[in-house]
Image (spheres, grey):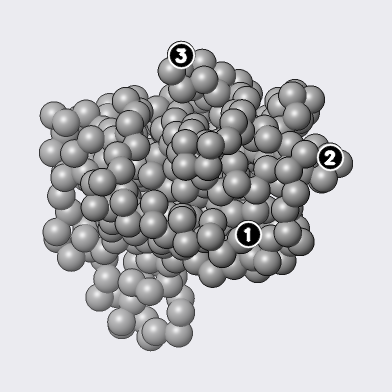
Amino acid sequence: MRSTPSRAGFALLGAAALALTACGEAPDEEESNDNGNDAAAQEDVDYTACIVSDDGGWNDQSFNQSAYAGLMDAVDELDIDHADAESSSESEFGPNVDSMVQQGCDLTFGVGFLLKDAIDEAASANEDMNFALIDEYTDESNDNAKSVVFNTSEGSYLAGYVAAAMSETGTVGTWGGMQIPSVTVFMDGFADGVERYNEDNDDDVSLVGWDKEEQNGSFSGDFSDQSAGATLTEQLIAQDADIIMPVAGGAGLGAGPALEESDGLLIWVDSDGYESTDYGDIVLTSVLKQIPQATFDTIEEGLNGEFSSEPYIGDLENEGVGLAPFHDYDSEVPDEVKDKVEQLREEIISGETVVETDNAPEA
């Protein structure tokens, strides 16, 4: 068993951490924001931004909640109107997107890969409205639809290196919600980061839950089933994994109790899990996607008449992805590991190191 220093807080590496406001039950109907401006000022802004979740819902403490937070930031700061629809199953995606169209939304976001068909169909049928899809590409034939995607393999590469460096058992793990590119891109980067650690340190830390070469691994089947997430985590723990990165939205929360029981550590994704989940005391770090900022920026472009179908691709260079602070575990992470992670971040930005994955978004 490898030994590590004692645990305790860290500074941000690469990108600013997300501080998400916890969202309760989101309103189902369009509301006008009231932040103290007088009625005349509010009438000057005639713009409605809308959003539809996948079946993880607004309180997944991950990508849905991040996108909703970005919308709420725009409501507060830009004084726009908004509407939303929270999906509980795949059968609701199309009707929920259509309900945004019926409410006259100027811009409608679909959150997640699973909303692709519904957003593409709505964009094709409503050329006078704008649409955006988070975590997947829209049909390029629709000039009124924007793709908001993230090359999270870069941030996960850093997380994989850290996980390998900090493992006490010599085994780390990852599992996903569904085997789709926006999930497996995380897992590919994580695998490469573990491998880089082994190469640089002549070590043999193992990764369970994902075989990058075979593109085969462990998946819960959706982004909401915490019970399935707990089962997968327990399976990886049984294989000696002591640091695990679930890539599964709300389903990933199922990893928390299992890791607490085994004295393991959690690497969260999308948001800063130290801030957004109830498991901050076991969160080593998080692979961030700056979904709130990308959502806000897309809304602001639309409000200013500058909406474009050109895809947004978040990466380390533009700080659309990054690694969160180590928070309570700062003193456990040796300075040489922190320095190495910063070096790797610069190597990726410069192109000296390329994280190879077919699942990464392309311009």
Residue 262 numbered tag: 2
Q: Which residue is mark 3?
A: 214
Marks 3 and 1 close (CB-CB < 8 Å): no
The amino acid type, in three-letter code, at marker 2 is Ser
Quick one: quadrant of the N terminus? top right
Q: Nearer the viewer, residue 33 or 17?
A: 17
Q: Position of residue 98 (x, y in %)?
A: 37, 35
Nearer to us: label 3 or label 1:
1
* Amino acid tagged 1: Val
- Which label's residue is closer to the chain start, 3 or 1? 3
Residue name at image x 18 percent, y 65 percent: 304
Mark 1 or mark 2, earlier in chain: 2
Q: Is residue 138 left or right of residue 235?
A: left
Mark 1, residue position: 333
For disc 3, the neighbor class at 10 Å (few under 14, some 14 to 19, many from 20) is few
Q: Element type at marker 1?
A: loop
